[in-house]
């Protein structure tokens, strides 16, 4: 006996349904999925491109990009103390168009950890924002166990929102920390990389733009 009831629609398998509606599905993917994927790619690309740092004055074929950083108290042989002492907001200029006069000022010193004999301590500072390509650096700075200061000019308009739901208020202070220490078998040259997110900190003094 034929069990099909007249007028009852036949069940359509999944793949048959996909085949029948392939044009609608393609249109849905084009209108909805592809733009979403594009937006995600833009966010991921912006974050990845500006979350790597180099410590060269100019980029060359030998330039090394660093993606992995530690906290200042995680250095192997020294404890590095950094204080953000002053922020000068830049002033806008018309001719030429841009920003001038802005800087971040810091003090720094190190303390050798127990059982370490340390020397030749230096830092190479870079200020660089996440999500955008705002960047500034100065030459290598020698450090000692006494407080010394250094200043990094930073002439960019902050805060800024380069992407939806992304707000950049301050750069990150990246430091290439180089030093030597003695071992029973000789002197070790050590290089470590530190990052300090300034968006979670406040300077001791803020100088407004003029």
Image: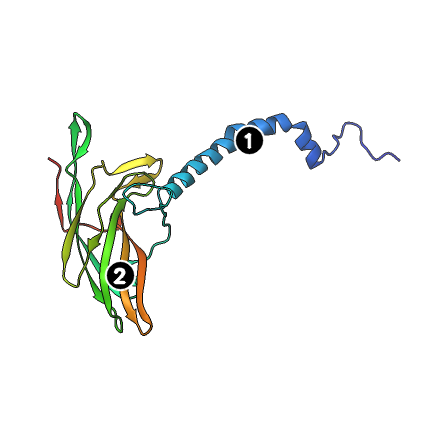
**Image spot of residue 164 (x, y percent):** 36, 35
Residue marked by disc 1: 29
**Image spot of residue 162 (x, y percent):** 32, 35
**Image spot of residue 133 (x, y percent):** 31, 38
Camera-side residue: 77 or 8? 77
Identify the mark at residue 132; answer none if there is no mark: none
Where disc 2 sits, the SS reads strand
Q: Residue at x 27, y 67 (%)?
A: 181
Q: Is residue 79 above or below residue 57?
A: below
Identify the mark at residue 179; answer none if there is no mark: 2
Where disc 1 sits, the SS reads helix
Q: Is residue 6 above or below residue 106?
A: above
Residue 8 shown left or right of residue 67 in the figure: right
* The N terminus, quarter of image: top right
- Give the Cα distance between marks 2 and 1: 55 Å
Q: Residue at x 14, y 56 (%)?
A: 148
| Type of colouring | rainbow
**Image spot of residue 3 (x, y percent):** 83, 35
> Badge 2, how many Cα within 10 Å: few under 14, some, many 20+?
some
Sooner in the amino-acid sequence: mark 2 or mark 1: 1
Badge nearest the viewer, 2 or 1? 2
Q: Quadrant of residue 77?
A: bottom left
């Amino acid at each position: 006996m034929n069990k099909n009831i007249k007028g009852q629609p036949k069940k359509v398998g999944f793949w048959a349904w996909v085949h029948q509606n392939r044009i609608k599905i393609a249109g849905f993917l084009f209108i909805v999925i592809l733009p979403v994927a594009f937006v995600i790619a833009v966010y991921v690309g912006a974050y990845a491109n500006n979350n790597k740092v180099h410590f060269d004055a100019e980029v060359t074929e030998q330039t090394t990009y660093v993606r992995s950083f530690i906290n200042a108290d995680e250095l192997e042989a020294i404890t590095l103390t950094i204080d953000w002492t002053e922020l000068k907001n830049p002033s806008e200029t018309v001719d030429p168009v841009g920003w001038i006069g802005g800087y971040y000022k810091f003090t720094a010193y190190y303390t050798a950890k127990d059982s370490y004999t340390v020397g030749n301590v230096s830092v190479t500072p870079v200020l660089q924002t996440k999500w955008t390509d705002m960047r500034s650096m100065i030459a290598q700075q020698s450090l000692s166990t006494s407080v010394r200061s250094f200043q990094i000019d930073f002439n960019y308009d902050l805060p800024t929102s380069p992407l939806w739901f992304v707000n950049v208020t301050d750069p990150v202070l990246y430091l290439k920390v180089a030093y030597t220490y003695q071992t029973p078998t000789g002197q070790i040259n050590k290089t470590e990389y530190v990052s300090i997110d300034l968006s979670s900190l406040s300077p001791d003094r803020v100088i407004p733009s003029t």
